[in-house]
Image (spheres, rainbow, N blue to C red):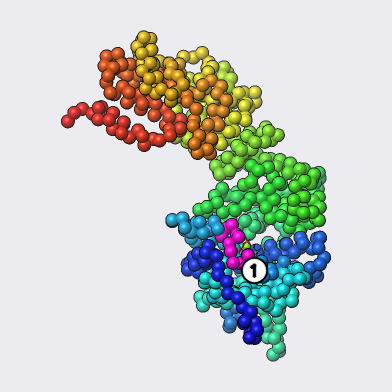
Amino acid sequence: MTQTTAQATESLEYRTEVRQLLDILAHSLYTEREIFLRELISNSSDALNRIQFEMLTNADVVDHDAELAIALRFDKEAKTLTISDSGVGMNREELVQNLGTIAHSGARNFLAGAKEKGAALDEVIGQFGVGFYSVFMVAQEVTVTSRSYRPEDQAWAWRSTGESSYELLPADKSSRGTEILIKLKEDADEFAGGWRLEQIVKKHSDYVSFPIYLVEEEEKEGEEEEKRRVINRRVALWRQPAQGVEAEQYNEFYKQLTFDAEDPQLHIHLITDAPVNLRTLLFVPSRRDRGHLSARSEYGLRLYSRKILIQNHNKDLLPEYFRFVEGVVDSEDLPLNVSREMVQSNPNLRQIRRALSNRIIRELKTLAENDTEKYNRLWQEFGVFIKEGVASDPSSQDSLVELLRFHSSKSAPEAWVTLSQYVERMAGEQEQIYYVLGQDVKSVAHSPHLDYFRANDIEVLYLVDPIDGYMTAMLREFKGKKLQNVDDAGLKLPEKEAETKGETVPQPDFDALVGRVKGVLGERISDVRESRQLVNNPCRLVSPENEFDRDLQRIRRLMEQDYQTPVKILELNRSHPLVRNLSGLVQNDRDNRLIDATIEQLFANALLVEGIHPNPVEMVERMQMLMEAALPAA
Ligand code: ADP
Ligand code: MG
């Protein structure tokens, strides 16, 4: 290196968060270090996509006619590996911005995960793209030399050993694109080998759409000769006729597209020419949360037009509630020379959206019919999104409701019931579909609201997702049957009295008890009255009749920090032993301290089963007092 270049070398400090990340990566014992290559190739592929897109509208770029490709070179003796591409390249500012700070959200999530106690680093590295910096798992030193596509820019080199700083220096590179020279660590020399590189590319980058060349030096009759061959499959799988594609190819393609380690649960390969041209491959992942944090930093489908990538995460191709779907959409009916923003306002987009969305619904229905077990697994992970769709998309509600699954008072705890099954099982005189809202299946199964329904053998659906209240607010009926919350104070039930056990508290005594309860609970309830439905439980809370947003209260409590659940009506079971004894005590020993404590605790219990107790710990002291009173003296 000449004296002048050395003088032009500048040393810059990394931002703190980069230093932290590098420190973790350099010392990680991650066994699949090979993913660094996936990250670098994916960056090259992004850079190539970007230049391809740029050239649609701009002819004034460096090396306009250069082949869009990636090349891998290695030197066994020097223990080096080089990855180069003819992508957009970077100028000095871009090198500093992109490689000196963490812009990459995967890496930021990774850092958060690493700090989180107990997160298994190994898994976190594999499941996020940690991005460019993952190269320091295998590199002693990295030199990135880049020439931007803009004619006025100059080539620069960026060099770092992965410690606290990096160097910048002017470079001598006339061809467009980026070259990354890696001096491998002593224990990472396996990556300076053709066979190993080819193996890694096949595993992680086979479907990258640009050719990846492996360039090897060969000696031929005493002469050094360069041999280049393409080592990736490079097929646009979504454009292949579905008959020719093996199940395993779909799985591999999915994993390389998403970096997910698990196979997808479902793939949808859709090829049509009318009403719009579409070449599409969609996937439902196996799990909603991959790894410790949700690995997907951004949702959206990859959008191509005529095999040119227009957008990595397009959010307009599907309704928002289908954001768990991954995949690729390629349509020749979307004009190429448009800005990404203009894609949104394209009329064909609406048609594509409808076609994709209908197809997903149809595939889910078919799966539900043909393979209940598999569908239920999918429902377990992604059912909340379907519910969101029912709540937010009136135009698809009719078809989405058929995909809904519920637990119920008449099925085994893990079993799922459809609305159609519920309706088929309804007895002749039953006119409504009953549901109870609650925290989870276990607690809702103990809900006092179910007393009447159990006694009369009427099925009640358990709605235990936070989003359920939102859904029922929008879904009023199914096949002409109204959906009815069982906690409604004005509930009109078939004229079957709940069977009563033993005596009931006489009216004057009951009135006195009601007065006492009102006095103790005050503003915390809106009324106290007798229940006609309770059998096994002493009391329950019901919502004032037709209270406007009562199904939404649950979700609002989760989302709004200082949301106060509106006060409810307390109903008492006049024939329950606890209520009878309490009433007796009010008559005969009105100053007994157990009275108010019992009233408080009954109210607390009712809040608990509703899943709306603001502070359960508050009960401890009172419970201990009541237990003390209940135990015989020693
Ligand atoms: P991400 O790819 O998710 O943005 P990375 O850490 O992998 O995060 O890369 C950081 C940034 O560095 C990229 O966004 C890109 O701007 C730039 N970059 C990395 N490699 C290349 C390359 N080969 N050509 C052009 N730019 C690159
Ligand atoms: Mg990247």
Determine whether 9 is above or below 110 in the image.
below
Residue at 71 percent of width and 57 percent of height: 237
Residue at 66 percent of width and 55 percent of height: 250
Q: Secondary structure at mark 1?
A: helix
Q: Position of residue 398 (x, y in %)?
A: 67, 32
- Which amino acid type is marked by label 1? Leu
Left/right placement of residue 546 relative to residue 525 reads right
Q: Quadrant of the N terminus?
A: bottom right
Left/right placement of residue 2 relative to residue 33 reads right
Ligand 2 shown in quarter = bottom right
Does residue 177 show up? no
Q: Quadrant of residue 129?
A: bottom right
Residue furthest to the bottom in view is: 222
Q: Position of residue 466 (x, y in %)?
A: 53, 37
Q: Is residue 106 magenta?
A: yes
Determine whether 416 is above or below 543 in the image.
below
Q: Quadrant of residue 78?
A: bottom right
Determine whether 93 is above or below 518 in the image.
below
- Decide: few, some or many residues near mark 1? Use Cα within 10 Å; few <14, some 14-19, many ≥20: some
Q: Quadrant of the C terminus?
A: top left
Left/right placement of residue 557 relative to residue 582 reads right
In this view of the protein, which residue sits in the foreground, 529 or 237?
529
Q: Disc 1 designates what residue? A: 95
Residue at 79 percent of width and 68 percent of height: 61
| Magenta stretch prevailing secondary structure | helix
Q: What residue range appears in magenta? A: 96-107
Does residue 437 show up? yes
Q: Position of residue 520 (x, y in %)?
A: 37, 22
